[in-house]
């Protein structure tokens, strides 16, 4: 695997000239190691004796142990210098030593440069492996952080979706409640409207009934007024006729009337009136007992009924009203046997006669 492949895509770019710097560093370390090796070899060769000699004896002898070098003892202070004595003559010079034997062949030191290079390579490999492990740890850390971030985003997204669903459910519930309230309000408004319409219809019906009753009362009043006018006119005409006939009156000395002759309804006149009025009595209810209603009827000379008045009630208002309606429907009464109609009559009406 190349270094370019191992480099993380998120790592900073390498500075330019790195290979050249690494090569110079390797050369400097190699030169330093060479100098150190040469210095060590030089020190070792300098400690060796310059001359070696081997002596052989005719009789083998055991060599004595090597004297150990005693530790230096402190030297006492020098005594005072004596009086200088006369200097003896110098001894003769010693004989020259024999020529030294040739030095033994120098041991060749092992070349440690390859080992140093291998060590340097191993160090570099270890550093590279450490760096790769660090990069891998960083990548793993970033991957974990990325996964944690994705997991957190997923949780937040799920939470948001749950919140949206909850909000949607609450909104739907609120809309449903609002729709129910609106429906209830419309139903109440419709009921109120129906009640108002019913009340208006009832009021209109009552108004129409009242208007109709007023119209009927007005018509009855007008009819009564016309009948009263007719009665007044008939009474006036009757008075005129009576005044014209006073000259030939036939009453006795004690008579107090104003007519020319005494007059009254015949015995059969009541039956004739009852026969004409009774068919007009409409009373579908069952009457308990036999109530009796007495009505005063005012009649014009031509037989037209101009007024009615109950002088004695039967105690049953429905029966009394039925009798009055029958007289109003009859309108005119029949003439008596003499061709005249009494101006005022007392009529009795009972359900059972």
Image (spheres, grey):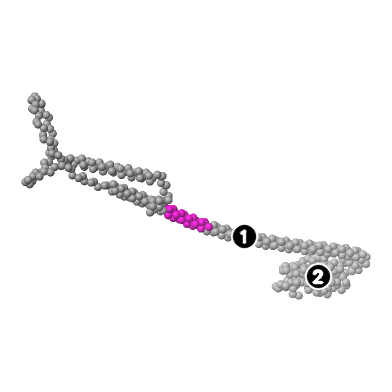
Is 150 on the left or on the right of 116, as rendered?
right
Q: Is residue 79 left or right of residue 22?
A: left
Identified at 81% across, 70% down, the residue is 330
Question: What is the magenta range?
Answer: 145-168
In which quarter of the view is residue 353 placed?
bottom right
Where's residue 196, x and y in %? Answer: 66, 60
**Count of labels shown?**
2
- Measuring 71% from the left and 73% from the top, which residue is drawn there? 286
Marks 2 and 1, the one that precedes in the sequence: 1
Q: Quadrant of the N terminus?
A: bottom left
Horizontal side of residue 158 vs 244, given as left or right: left
Residue 26 x, y percent position in the rendering:
33, 45
- Disc 1, SS: helix
Q: According to the image, label 1 marks what residue?
A: 186
Q: Distance of mark 2 from mark 1, alpha carbons?
A: 58 Å
- Look at mark 2 in the image and give the residue it sits on: 330
Within 10 Å of the Cα at label 1, are there few (<14), some (14-19), or many (20+) other Cα atoms? few
């Amino acid at each position: 695997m190349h270094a370019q492949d191992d480099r993380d895509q998120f790592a900073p770019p390498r500075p330019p000239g790195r290979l050249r710097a690494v090569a110079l560093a390797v050369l400097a370390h190699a030169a330093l190691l060479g100098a150190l090796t040469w210095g060590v070899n030089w020190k070792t060769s300098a400690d060796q004796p310059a001359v070696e000699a081997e002596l052989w004896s005719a009789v083998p002898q055991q060599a004595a142990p090597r004297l150990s070098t005693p530790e230096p003892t402190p030297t006492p202070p020098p005594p005072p210098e004596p009086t200088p004595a006369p200097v003896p003559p110098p001894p003769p010079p010693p004989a020259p030593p024999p020529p030294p034997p040739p030095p033994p062949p120098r041991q060749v030191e092992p070349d440690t440069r390859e080992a140093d290079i291998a060590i340097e390579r191993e160090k570099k490999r270890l550093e590279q492996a450490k760096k790769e492990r660090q990069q891998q740890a960083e990548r793993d850390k970033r991957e974990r952080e990325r996964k944690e971030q994705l997991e957190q985003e997923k949780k937040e997204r799920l939470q948001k979706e749950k919140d949206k669903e909850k909000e949607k459910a609450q909104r739907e519930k609120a809309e449903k409640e609002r729709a129910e309230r609106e429906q209830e309000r419309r139903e109440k408004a419709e009921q109120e409207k129906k009640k108002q319409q019913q009340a208006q219809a009832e009021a209109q019906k009552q108004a129409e009934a009242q208007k109709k009753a007023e119209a009927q009362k007005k018509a009855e009043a007008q009819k009564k007024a016309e009948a009263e006018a007719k009665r007044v006119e008939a009474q006036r005409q009757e008075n005129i006729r009576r005044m014209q006939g006073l000259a030939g009156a036939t009453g006795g000395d004690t008579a107090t009337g104003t007519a020319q002759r005494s007059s009254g309804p015949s015995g059969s006149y009541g039956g004739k009136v009852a026969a004409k009025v009774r068919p007009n009595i409409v009373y579908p209810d069952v009457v308990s007992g036999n109530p009796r209603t007495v009505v005063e009827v005012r009649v014009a000379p031509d037989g037209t009924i101009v007024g009615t008045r109950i002088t004695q009630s039967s105690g049953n208002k429905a029966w009394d009203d039925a009798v009055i309606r029958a007289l109003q429907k009859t309108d005119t009464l029949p003439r008596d046997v003499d061709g005249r109609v009494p101006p005022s009559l007392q009529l009795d009406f009972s359900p059972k006669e």
